[in-house]
Image: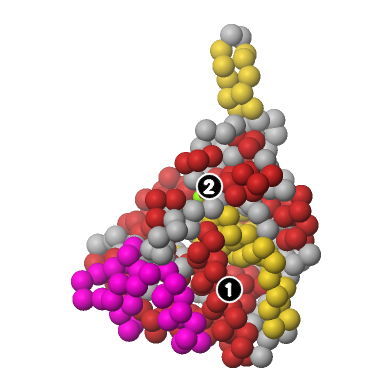
Amino acid sequence: MHMNICLLPGDGIGPEIVTQGTKVLDAVARRFGHTVSTSSALIGGAAIDATGSPLPDATVEACRTSDAVLLGAVGGPKWDDLPSEKRPEKGLLGIRKALGLFANLRPAALFPELAGACLLRADIAAAGLDLVVVRELTGDVYFGQPAGIETRDGLRTGFNTMIYDEDEVRRIARVAFDTARARKRRVCSVDKANVLATSRLWREVVEEVARDYPDVELSHMYVDNAAMQLVRWPAQFDVIVTGNLFGDILSDEAAVITGSIGMLPSASMGSGGPALFEPIHGSAPDIAGQDKANPIATILSVGMMLRLGFGLTAEADAIDTAVRRVLAEGYRTGDIMENGRTLVGTVSMGNLIAERI
Ligand code: IPM
Ligand code: MG
């Protein structure tokens, strides 16, 4: 197979981790007889510096004409004072919208090799944590109109619109149920239906979709309770499906309790067209350019790209296995370092994994 990948390295540690991701992709291609071509485009702060816009048209075009997109990270203190329309984050929100990437899959699982890093009490961790947050990504209060800040009756007033139509809920619910079918067949839909009209429609539509999936168990949970249950007993969750805002918050929570946020990949998918794969962590400007960043989340994002973007299961498995082997052999970047292990930098970690493909 030939894979035409658009790279969006972005800011901070983005470029160095994306380089390790493509290194591992090349190793997979060599082993399995595929070919890869890559092009690179600007996004976020890097794009602002070069063009004045966090998402130049040329970047959208480069993504559209690729088979899949691999993104590093965007943002940094340098651009924090810009108005919201010009911030690096707008580049990320813009590319999601432009490519119609409505489904964001964020797996959070414990790596047995990193059990010591888990933030949960030992008995809670022992029960397991292996879940996927399926977050709706192109709707909700993130994009709802009207939104803005204006003066009303002499008072500065900020407002956003929380809005979902039934089609938007239906398509993300289907992604969640399909995802559950390949896992433990449990979906927990998270909303705030005791307060929000948006959530009441959400719940109704999810119930309707569930009728097409009698083999999958559906439950509902209010978002405040879900935030609590995630730390209290995460083993109860398999697939969590939720809206854009709640999903943003819960996916960070689910990720951080594993103790290895530098390890977790994500996929953003649409209906056809190229999907986008990225680590869930940010641009870590404090360690950028110092060969300290953990490239594993990006490397595992390449794995998700192979599995979900190209349907290449054996190739994706090879990446997961190589990562597990390197961890089992004791190699660690600074963020996951423990006594008695071998500290390595970004480039070495990439090499070690690529060599084990
Ligand atoms: C994420 C990030 C983004 C979001 C920001 C950077 C716009 O927090 O991908 O979770 O809120 O979606
Ligand atoms: Mg977030």
Give the mark nearer the N terminus: 2 vs 1. Answer: 1
Image position of 155 with respect to 94: above or below: above
Which residue is denoted by mark 2 in the rendering? 75
- At label 1, counting other C-alpha atoms closer than 10 Å, the crowd grade (few under 14, some 14-19, many 20 or more) is many
Viewer can see residue 134: no
Q: How many marks?
A: 2
Q: Secondary structure at mark 1?
A: helix
Farthest-out residue, left: 339
Residues 272 and 333: in front is 333
In the image, is residue 330 part of the stretch drawn in magenta? yes
- Mark 1 vs ligand 1: CB below 8 Å: no
In the image, is residue 42 part of the stretch drawn in magenta? no
The stretch in magenta equals 328-357
- Locate residue 39, reporting x and y percent: 70, 67
- Locate residue 335, reporting x and y percent: 34, 63
Image position of 87 with respect to 59: above or below: above
Q: Residue visible at 55% across and 76% down?
A: 23
- Locate residue 160, reporting x and y percent: 62, 32
* Residue 340 circle label: none
Amino acid bearing label 2: Gly
Which residue is denoted by mark 1 in the rendering? 22
Cα distance, mark 2 to mark 1?
A: 21 Å
Is 342 on the left-hand or right-hand side of 281?
left
Amino acid bearing label 1: Thr
- Mark 2 vs ligand 1: CB below 8 Å: yes
